[in-house]
Image: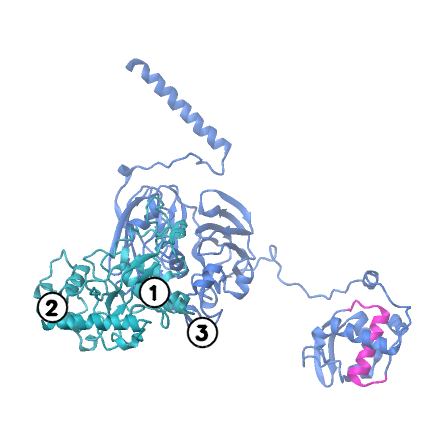
Chain colours: A cyan, B blue
Amino acid sequence: MKKRIYCLLITALLLTIQLLHIPLSAQEGQTMVFIPAGSYLPLYSGNKTTKVPAFMIDRLPVTNADFGRFIADNPEWSRKNVKRLFADAGYLRHWKDDGTFAPGIAGSAVVNVSWFAARKYCECQGKRLPTTAEWERAAEAGRTRPDGRNEEGFYALILELISKPSFTHLPEAGTTLKNYYGVWDLIGVTWEWTWDFNSALSTGESRGNASLDNTLFCGGGSLQSGDTGNYAAFLRYAMRSSLKASNTVQSLGFRCAKDVAR
Amino acid sequence: MKKNSLPFIAIGFITHVMLLSACQNADSSNDDSHIGREYNLTEIKGEERAVLTPPPFVPPPITRDHASKVIVDLEIIEQEMEIADGVNYMFWTFGGTVPGSFIRIREGDYVEFHLKNHPDNKLPHNIDLHAVTGQGGGAEATFVAPGYEATFNFTALNPGLFVYHCATAPVGMHIANGMYGLILVEPKEGLPKVDKEFYVMQGDFYTEGSYGESGLQAFDMNKAIKEQADYVVFNGKVGALTGDNALKARTGETVRLFVGNGGPNLVSSFHVIGEVFDNVYMEGGSLKNHDIQTTLVPAGGSAITEFKVEIPGNFILVDHSIFRAFNKGALGILAVDGEENKQIYSGKSEPGIYQPAAEAVKKVRKSPETAAISPEQQLAIGEKLYQVNCSACHLADGKGVAGVFPPVAGSDFIAKSPEKAIGAVVNGLSGEITVNGVKYNSVMPRQALTDAETAAVLNFVYSTMNGSDMRVTADQVKNARK
């Protein structure tokens, strides 16, 4: 009963935000951020936009501390116990041993996690991984407007951040770049898993494969891309399609998302 | 049936031989115009690991007379390095250098290629080797996330010098960040022996700051798309092949340059100042051209040039699209020491002064000699003539450059003797003179001015620049001419 009321309250709150256009900064205290329904232009769709229903997304990426708690509750996902099928040998390799890591990185995004582990983590939180469309829609926002494409210098900033070498020590989550919606660190710190990370049907070959329906990486087929100037998106798509679900990468973390209660 | 087949085979064989020899006669420079390359995996003997070298070095020639299995291990490293002194750039590299490691194999070799993406890297990469016959040149097979390794095998069907590069989206950015190199597939018969072999590869770079702006410079996508390069360099850095890093040879040695061009955008007009290429394997293939001054190296292409260094000195490698050499870094040096050969090149002989005949000078100009003009008009004409003919050296204000170009304003030399002043203008002046106590030892060429013009310009100098009442007439000038 209590839970129900709580739920109603949240829904009411969200509705109020939507209806009254309460500034988004009002959501700052929340762990999740509301992204209103909208459309997003996938890189590979020509000029066909995709409708993305409203959703909630974590304000911050999942940290080492968060993930440590998850493993404490779910020991089958520890480094020692995890099935090779679900995470390869690099799983959590930046940790000292199962469950302990350098105290300095507690608040930094967790990396070296497989897609299976990320999915399980979100499931245990009553959440799920964001879809690529949701993730890209959230990341499309600039610093000051919902569409970063029109924001002066935003693309250049993203490229600059991405071109920088991998961090040896990741910065504390929530200290680098906050976007219009109040979501932190989507760009420039780590890559992030998405639910359908490998659905772009690309082959990693950036020019050929004209026979594929989604000629995302076709050099000539860049004609197919909705936005050939969005190199950061190209890099993200390339990164995603280079992965297998059991892979663990030093610069790849995740955050969770959730449907908006209807 | 069986009975008859033997003569047919024999005839077939003879015709084949005849065809082959006819082919050779028809085109001796390119004797392999057959379409399709043969390979035979059963001929492969032994296994070895390819020796990889950073630029400008080249692995030793292949001496075996058979194909082998060759294992190539190439590591991708993203790292910050200097693109010019004091200017850093985040390079993505094959083997830690730009261009990437030089790979040398033999025609027919069966290659097992391992591409390793270092775990510290941020991005997935792959490799497209132009020497590979197969989809994407291996790009598809080698697409690999950071911290992983991809492996594929290929048989080197065609001999030649080939570019390899990363082909991951956005491909231009990967190449623009330095992801290219050369792989040499030596022909079965090998390349003729030379004394020195070097690896030189051009690339264009697009940075947020303009050329020379210090600090870490980010990749500038817009400039790259517009093809407006800030840097055009050999071997990844301004000065990678100059000073202490110059390529070195001794007179009498034969030199082979393996030249590549990674692009991503620009085509190179490769030239070595002071050398003629005795041989050029055009576009890195089998066709050998001779006596070439400048060879075109396409983006994503190559050339092999061979020559003998006869004369000591610095021979400068340039992209003869010359602003790139002068302003963007496309410059390297081949430093040759050893004995002079005056027969081939004398060096600078005694300097002489060139003075065209006075008549020739006069002929080309129409003279307003007889026109009657006022002193004011003459001054105005004189000023204009001064600015056009004199100000480049003596400067607009006539003060000159101490020790180099003597002053003509407030000048004791001018004031003392109008004859000397006139003489300098119409006959030229060389040797040591002293002006206002400063010694000058240089050459002033004869000026192509008429008598009236000379008078006008000198009168301008006397009145305006020296506050003198001295006036020169056209007749005086006429008499002073030698």
Select label 3 or label 1 by which is in front: 1
Q: Which mark is residue B214?
A: 3
Q: Residue at x 32, y 46 (%)?
A: A212
Occupied quadrant, residue B81: bottom left
Return the chain for callout 1: A
Q: Are marks 3 and 1 in contact (CB under 8 Å)?
A: no
Task: Find disc 1 in the rendering and name its residue.
Answer: A140
- Say whether residue B472 is left or right of residue A122: right
Q: Nearer the viewer, residue B205 or B272?
A: B205
Q: Does residue B74 appear in this view?
A: yes
Q: Residue B452: within the magenta?
A: yes
Q: Which residues are magenta?
A: B446-469
> What's the distance in space between the residues labelled 1 and 2, CA to CA?
32 Å
Mark 1 or mark 2: whose residue is earlier in sequence: 2
Q: How many marks?
A: 3
Query: Label 2 to label 3, Cα distance in Å?
Result: 47 Å
Which quadrant of the structure image shows residue B90?
bottom left
Q: Give the amino acid type for the residue marked by disc 2 in the picture.
A: Ile
